[in-house]
Image (spheres, helix red, strand yellow):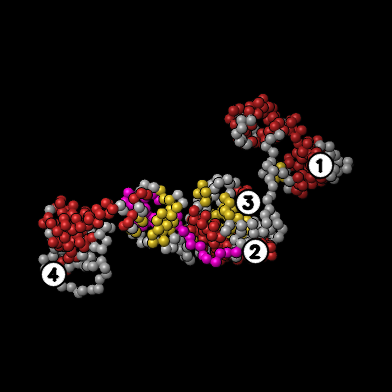
Amino acid sequence: MVSVSRRQVTMNEIVEMIFQWHQGAGFKQIERSLGFDRNTVRKYIRLAQVAGVARGTPFPPEEELAQKLQAAGEASFLRTTPARALIAPHRDWIAELLHKGKKIDAKQIWRLFEEKTERRIGYCTMLRYLRSEFHWCAPVVTVRIEVEPGSQAQVDFGSAGMMREAPGGRLRKAWAFIMVLSYSRHRYVRFVFHMDVRTWIDCHERAFAFFNGCPATVVLDNLKSGVIKPDIYDPTLNRAYAEMERHYGFVADPAKVREAKHKGKVERLVPVVRGQLLAGRDFRDIEEANEKALLWCKEQIGMQIHGTTKRRPFEVFQNEEASCLKALPAEAFDIPLWKACTVHPDHHVVFDRSYYSLPTRFIGRQVWVRGGCRQVHVFLDGQLIKTHNRSFVPGTFVTDQSDYPPDKLAYLMAAPTYCRGQAAQIGPQTEALVRSILGDHAMRNLRKAQAVLRLAKKYGSAAMESAAERSLFFGNFRYRSIKAILENGWKPPQEPVEQVRLELSELGKSFLRPADYFTSKTEVLP
């Protein structure tokens, strides 16, 4: 195939061009018939004449003519091109580039040549020179690998443009998850807004359910959700994805980085999804797009004759491949959340915004934490070292007291008692305030109680007693509120305020205000 005037001229078109000339047609007639400009027609007719084609002689068979044209073209290049004369003096330098052992392509040699000589030549000129002189840069020969039914699927994410979360909602960037069964070419498409682990696994599960089975191998893209460290020979699978792999019994085979040929079937489908499923359609929201995608996979693209197999993918799937897929497991897969955590000096790791304790000997170590639906499991070097019930309330401390060493535990248990004793020495109001702050979770609220006692040292016992009385009256035990009372010198109410008593939440009276709150400009809590 030859590139001329921004068009790709095929060998069939060249042969037709020469045949029409051979039969007596002129350049203008050929130009009008085939749509090529006159210079292009003249170029190939001259090449045919060099190859020995002449009017009044038998027209050669197509294969023979193609060989003659190729030989004539190379001979013409070797004999006439002025650019070759520019390249020839630098042959040894080019040979050195080729034999350095580093991977270098023709385009880079062309760039380096222009930098070195400050002369401009065409890239195709350099390519022809390399092929003729070094028998190098020949087109890469590939072998198409076909697979057995049910043996392989290929998956990837591709950009799907902007979609709405709900009818009339805001537009967001969407992605298309695509899984193709390599034998039948039957595919599954789902649009999503995220490319995280949970979405990645959920899309796999939906695809397996759509096919009603699981392939033996899944060739996946080097997305972080599936592969943490891409490597041709020893890829490290994401832990959650690896769990799903074992649950369903397939083998994950990461594609080589930046090698689309290793996932050719799915890589070629990404533009097909954009061009045939999305182009020209305005979906109400992403849910409608997914409904359309399922129908498209079965009834439209699934029933079109495939360009390679010349068969309908959905029919091939039903008749030959569906029965070869692995049966789906009876139990649903519990999608886990895995995270690498460091055990902090306070004996806890932070996982999903909650805190989980571990024994002292693990402080400073990096561990892997797995969060399931009900429990959290902590692993070190593949060994389970701790199990906790999972908390879904952010900021919760899940602490096993036995994780502390005996001496530290005794200190921690004594600390709340010490705080209560210090508060009692200041006065009864402060003691009551500290007891209220510590409450039923003394260890969790210990720092707040200690901070309040430091305020007493700064402002004095009398001021602290007054502030404690006011805080107790309003049921407001927040540190900042207590500090604001002391800074502003606010006093407790002198007389009880009659007001309608309402049923309160466990927060107590912290949201109620006395009558003078709405008239006084100085008695306002921050």
Q: Which mark is residue 264?
A: 3
- The mark that comes first in sequence, 3 or 1, is 1
**Nearest-to-viewer mark from 3 and 1:** 3
Question: Circles 4 and 1: CB distance less than 8 Å?
Answer: no
Bounds of the magenta segment: 327-355
Q: Residue at x 15, y 73 (%)?
A: 498
**Nearest-to-viewer mark from 4 and 1:** 4
Within-10-Å neighbours for mark 2: few <14, some 14–19, many 20+: some
- The mark that comes first in sequence, 1 or 2, is 1
- What amino acid type should be assigned to the residue bearing mark 4? Pro
Question: Where is residue 248, by image quadrant?
Answer: bottom right
- What amino acid type should be assigned to the residue bearing mark 2? Ala
Within-10-Å neighbours for mark 3: few <14, some 14–19, many 20+: few
- The mark that comes first in sequence, 4 or 1, is 1
Q: CA distance from mark 2 to mark 4?
A: 79 Å
Q: Nearer the viewer, residue 167 or 55?
A: 167
- Mark 3 residue element: helix
- The mark that comes first in sequence, 3 or 4, is 3
Q: Which residue is mark 1?
A: 65
| 374 relative position to 113: left or right | left
Residue 297 position, x and y percent, is 61, 63
**Nearest-to-viewer mark from 1 and 2:** 2
Q: Residue at x 69, y 29 (%)?
A: 84
Residue 75 in the magenta stretch? The answer is no
Q: Which residue is mark 2?
A: 322
- Mark 4 residue element: loop
Q: Which mark is residue 496?
A: 4
- What amino acid type should be assigned to the residue bearing mark 3? Gly
Question: Circles 3 and 4: CB distance less than 8 Å?
Answer: no
Residue 329 position, x and y percent, is 56, 64
- What amino acid type should be assigned to the residue bearing mark 1? Leu
